[in-house]
Amino acid sequence: MTIRKRSPLEIKVTESHQCSVDLRLKILRKVPFFQGLPLADIQRINDLFVEKGFDVDEMICFDGDPATHLFVIAEGRVKLMRHSLAGKEIVLDLLTSGEFFGSLSAQAGDVYSDSAQAQTPVCILTIGRDTFRKILDRHPQVALKVLDIISARLRTANERLHQLGTLPVEARLANVLLALADKFGEKHGKSCLIQVPLSREDLGAMIGATPESTSRAMSQFQKNGLIDSGREWIAVLDRQGLEVLTETDLS
Amino acid sequence: MTIRKRSPLEIKVTESHQCSVDLRLKILRKVPFFQGLPLADIQRINDLFVEKGFDVDEMICFDGDPATHLFVIAEGRVKLMRHSLAGKEIVLDLLTSGEFFGSLSAQAGDVYSDSAQAQTPVCILTIGRDTFRKILDRHPQVALKVLDIISARLRTANERLHQLGTLPVEARLANVLLALADKFGEKHGKSCLIQVPLSREDLGAMIGATPESTSRAMSQFQKNGLIDSGREWIAVLDRQGLEVLTETDLS
DNA sequence: CGACGAATTGAACCTATTCAAAGGGTGTGG
DNA sequence: CCACACCCTTTGAATAGGTTCAATTCGTCG
């Protein structure tokens, strides 16, 4: 009955220390908030970044540590999270190439608010936060783009608050799976493979549930043909089916 | 045993339609993101705002409606929230004089992401979102201030996500009470009165709990001398006592 | 004073957690 | 290349925290 399934995930084995200067430039030009900037400016800005590689599961920065840098992902997947004293952790976001995290505004408590962990091998471009602030001062258009991005993140954070506060585990899981499919989905015929290695524990930490509860819900979904899943991989089979569950508030 | 208590809240009965131009100017100068701007500029910007009054419980804007305006609170308290199809609602934020809400960035889905309701009689300054965007374009320093504010809101939204995902009702309530005391607290000797009318339902909607659960926890707190409370009012008596509970994760 | 809405409290119920044990995929070393 | 060990996953049963429904009390305002 149960067929042995090998992981269909393709993790790029980017030799992280070899983000050539050319590659870096190419990446920075794709970063949303640098788009529209004259190439010359981007080149100058490029020189301000320092690259750094991280292995899977390696921590990039810690919640509570002095916030000195802004990080831009050149290649790979990064998990943003917070952990409580009792060890329980919650995943705030999964980021990919072109996205940033770390210290943005020089203000408000100069410590990182979140921890960041490499979910795949990752190549990061770092820049001092004061240096970045100067870029913002000098290039107002960039500041406005950043504002738009942060606004969007606030919106989705609020949406998740809403879900966490009002929906049961099943519905929250359906919502996350759809969001993941949108962001990391790779179409393979009818199925949509989520190109991030995610354990039940990771998934649970995204919806405020235990690994066990998450597993139960996933099994349910799989039984109903909504998804296919194995060890640290997920594929969405029936998008509409999941969408029906996203607001299952109906007591 | 139980003493009859009258509400100690002082709700300003601002005649909302009478925010004189002078008053408006005074308020705009106090708005965080206009600080540091030359008075002449503020005066010019002042003319772009239109004032509007709202009674208690009146809706200021609806989640999902076309987003046309940015709102700045001149006087009063505003509740930002989202409601689900099943009627359950969650309170995202409580705002006061000088704070803003509504449509910021012209981008991403031109509908309001949240609903806003007057928690007290309120005087609002409104401005078209395109007009405001032009102000941001013209005054980069303002854009940076706004960025800082939105960043801070994102941080607290993430903090609340963390709490909602990992802490029990009791601890979440303690956290909210402390935050409310910090933002709206009015010292009266040892006690700190929270200057916002809040029902158990409102409080529950802030921590993702039912009015009943909230009431039980509040009764508990009151029994332990941590707070004092009556119909739609709360005072914090023992700050440290509450702080102990904020991380009661200990199973 | 009377009435309406808020707050409290109780008891049954239910969802999700906890603890525990067994099964399955992956990668490593022999 | 196979086998073993490790970790992820699944599933079960008991438990607990929170919800729901309902009835009562209390406070505020007309």
Image (tube, coloured by chain):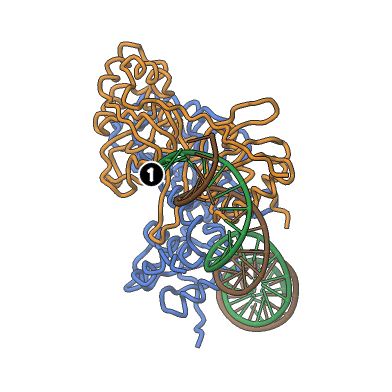
Chain colours: A orange, B blue, C green, D brown
Which residue is at 51% across, 62% downward? B197
Image position, residue A163 (x, y; %) = 59, 49
Residue at horizontal 38%, vertical 44%?
B152
Q: Chain of mark 1?
A: B
Please tell me which residue lies in front, A58 or B216.
A58
Pick the residue in front: A93 or B36. Answer: A93
**Quick check: can you spot residue B125?**
no
Q: What percent of the width, then of the height, locates residue B55?
A: 57, 52
Position of residue B228 measured from the top left corner of the image (x, y, whole percent): 45, 74
Helix, strand or loop at mark 1: helix
- For the point 69% across and 25% down, the residue is A189
Mark 1 is surrounded, within 10 Å at the Cα level, by few (under 14), some (14 to 19) or many (20 or more) other residues, namely some
Which three-letter amino acid code belongs to the residue tagged 1?
A: Ala
The answer to which quarter of the image holds residue B99 is top left
Horizontal and vertical percent position of residue A192: 64, 31
Q: Nearer the viewer, residue C2 or B138?
A: B138
Q: Which residue is mark 1?
A: B152
Residue A37 in the image: above or below residue C21: above
* Quadrant of the drawing holding the C terminus of chain A: bottom right
| Res A237 visible | yes
Drawn side of residue A126 relative to residue B46, left or right: left
Q: Nearer the viewer, residue B175 or B32?
A: B175
